[in-house]
Image (cartoon, helix red, strand yellow):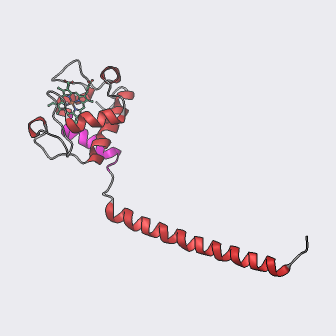
Amino acid sequence: MMFKPEVLVLTLAATMMMARGLQIGRRELLASAFVGWTTTTPKPANAEDGVQLFAKNCAACHAGGGNIVARTKTLSAADLNRDGYSSLEKMAEIIALGKNAMPGYGEACQPKLACTFGPHLSEDEVNSVAEFVLDQAQAGWPQS
Ligand code: HEC
């Protein structure tokens, strides 16, 4: 193959231009993603919120992971497993919608009579308290 310096130079120039174009594109993309994130995402609830949300909304019936209303339906890992609440999804569902004598806490809880009379919890808050309950259940409710 014959060596052609002009081809090499051209290829190099094209590669550099493409790389620069990509870089700018990426930076712009990141910047707009960041702006979108800061303007549209509410502050995510964190683990500390879970502790407090539980104390405020659940402990009246479930202090220490128990259940003073339906005594066989505690928040122990064994009871949660038996009743199908050991996944985050199912846990968040019962918290949001309630069940029998347990009120629902989610924003979409219907009908109103089956829901808490207090302020409803956002999806983030529901997930945060659900994670707290699952963590505690797994650890045998040290925070009682
Ligand atoms: C007014 C009392 C009351 C409050 C407050 C309450 N619950 Fe309950 N909870 C119950 C009752 C009663 C049941 C049993 C429901 C049934 O019939 O299956 C239950 C069941 C559960 C279960 C399923 C337990 C099992 O082993 O089947 C979970 C999980 C749960 N509650 C979580 C929560 C969380 C988290 C909160 C706070 C956001 C909360 N509950 C607030 C009364 C309450």
Most common secondary structure along the magenta stretch: helix
**What's the residue at 59%, 74% (across, down)?**
21
Is 11 positioned to the left or the right of 45 in the image?
right
Is 25 positioned to the left or the right of 51 in the image?
right
Q: Nearer the viewer, residue 16 or 81?
A: 16
- Determine the image quadrant of residue 8: bottom right
100 over 72 or under it: above or below? below
Q: Does residue 69 show up?
A: yes
Is 54 positioned to the left or the right of 14 in the image?
left
User: Which residue extends farthest front?
Assistant: 1
User: Which residue extends farthest bottom?
Assistant: 6
Residue 139 % position (x, y)? 39, 28
Is residue 54 magenta-colored? yes
- Determine the image quadrant of residue 112: top left
- Determine the image quadrant of residue 40: bottom left
Residue 18 % position (x, y)? 64, 73
Is 52 positioned to the left or the right of 38 in the image?
left
Quadrant containing the C terminus is top left
Is residue 141 magenta-colored? no
Magenta part of the protein: which range? 45-58
**What's the residue at 48%, 68% (across, down)?**
29
